[in-house]
Amino acid sequence: MSHPPGLDLDQLRAHLDRERPGLVAGPLTGRLIEGGRSNLTYQVSDGTTTWVVRRPPLGHVLATAHDMKREHRVIAGLHPTNVPVPEPVLLCEDQEVIGAPFYVMEFVDGTPYRTEQELAPLGPERTRAAVLGLVDTLVDLHAVDPAAVGLGDFGRPEGFLDRQLRRWGKQLDASRNRELPGIDELQAALGRALPTSPAPTIVHGDYRLDNVLVRQDPDGVDRIKAILDWEMSTLGDPLTDVGLLAMYSARLDMPDSPISTTASAPGHPSPAELIERYAERSGRDVSAIAWYTAFAWFKLAVILEGIHYRYTLGQTVGAGFDRIGELVPVFIAHGLNTLKEG
């Protein structure tokens, strides 16, 4: 039996048998579902039941338990609520078992829609319903009282926006090796206009259609079955999640862009409609949403510039990486326009 990279199935089985006797019914098979710079995700099965295992990337300088513990903690806190998350099975902080800390959760069947091509077969009505469901699920997440689910100390909400802006400014400085007209102007304008945050909530930090699993119920409705990828989650300003969702729902209008969004899929609601639905259902004031959306454009510009920077150093290989750099000015322009037009 072959082991997927970074996951010794025999060691995993022995650990599960010790910690959760009777859980695993037969020999484990497994495969890497998703790898990359962020955490690794595996699908593991005993032939009857399927689970998901998450661990830090291979060759991680510090395979800290921190990320795994945080992800597992937020999922465990939210599982009893009506926010859809996989059921947690166990957290292992002992690096001796598979060489890194990890956690195990139930496998949830569903599709993470990444591109408009993947959404197109659903047709306009189903696409529209699925994306509106994304907003409704976000409203449910932001309605959870963090203290009531044991997450009252999950982050430092005071000064959250200021810290976020500084953090991404530092990221930008770490990957600067070319002129990027407008990016300093965008960062300065965001700094001058910091809004006053509403009461803090649990924030996902990377909330978009391809970080949730959607499945059609027997009644024909596409519902969100699980929110995944909690590695950026914390306690903070809920409108940062809304601004990011609005940004991901804007059309880039770049033919064959190296980054695919779902925004051009027929039936996909506009950013304005998503923001309005969020405001209506959450009761929150969204009058400063232009700032949050512009901040999302800035953050993505910085992330893409980081990828471009690593590409120029020969550290990233693969299709599309050579063109990521072209996108950065587009994101900067969108950010500046969003702030100007409000």
Image (cartoon, grey):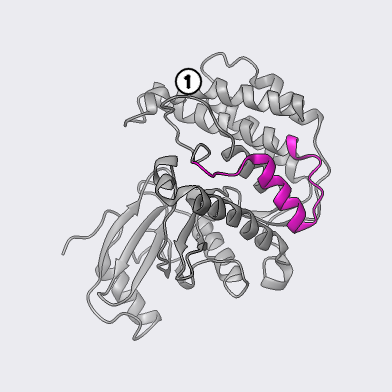
Image quadrant occupied by the C terminus: top right
Q: Name the residue nearer the viewer: 268 or 163.
A: 268
Give the image location of residue 225, x and y in percent.
50, 65
**Number of marks in picture:** 1
Is 95 rendered above or below residue 56? below
In the rendered view, does 5 fall on the left or right side of 333?
Answer: left
**Which percent across, then down, holds residue 153?**
70, 62
232 to the left or right of 62: right
Quarter-of-image position of residue 323? top left
**Residue neighbourhood size for the residue with mark 1, other residues' Cα within 10 Å, grouped as few (<14), some (14–19), many (≥20):** some
As shown in the figure, which amino acid type bears the numbered disc 1? Glu
Position of 110 with respect to 201 (left or right) is left
Q: Secondary structure at mark 1?
A: helix
Can the viewer see residue 61 in this picture?
Answer: no
Q: Residue furthest bottom?
A: 22
Which residue is at a point 56% across and 22% down the rendered structure image? 330
282 is within the stretch colored magenta: yes
Q: Position of residue 207 (x, y in %)?
A: 58, 49
Which residue appears at 44% of the width and 24% of the height?
A: 255
Q: Nearer the viewer, residue 131 or 188?
A: 131
Q: Could you say where residue 84 lies in the image, as x and y percent from the top left?
A: 55, 66
Magenta residues, as a range? 266-290
Residue named by callout 1 = 326
Q: Residue at x 53, y 24 (%)?
A: 328
Is residue 14 visible in the rendered image? The answer is yes
Which residue is nearer to you in this view: 296 or 76? 296
Residue at position x 55%, y 50% from top?
128
Q: In front here: 281 or 64?
A: 281
Q: Is residue 63 magenta?
A: no
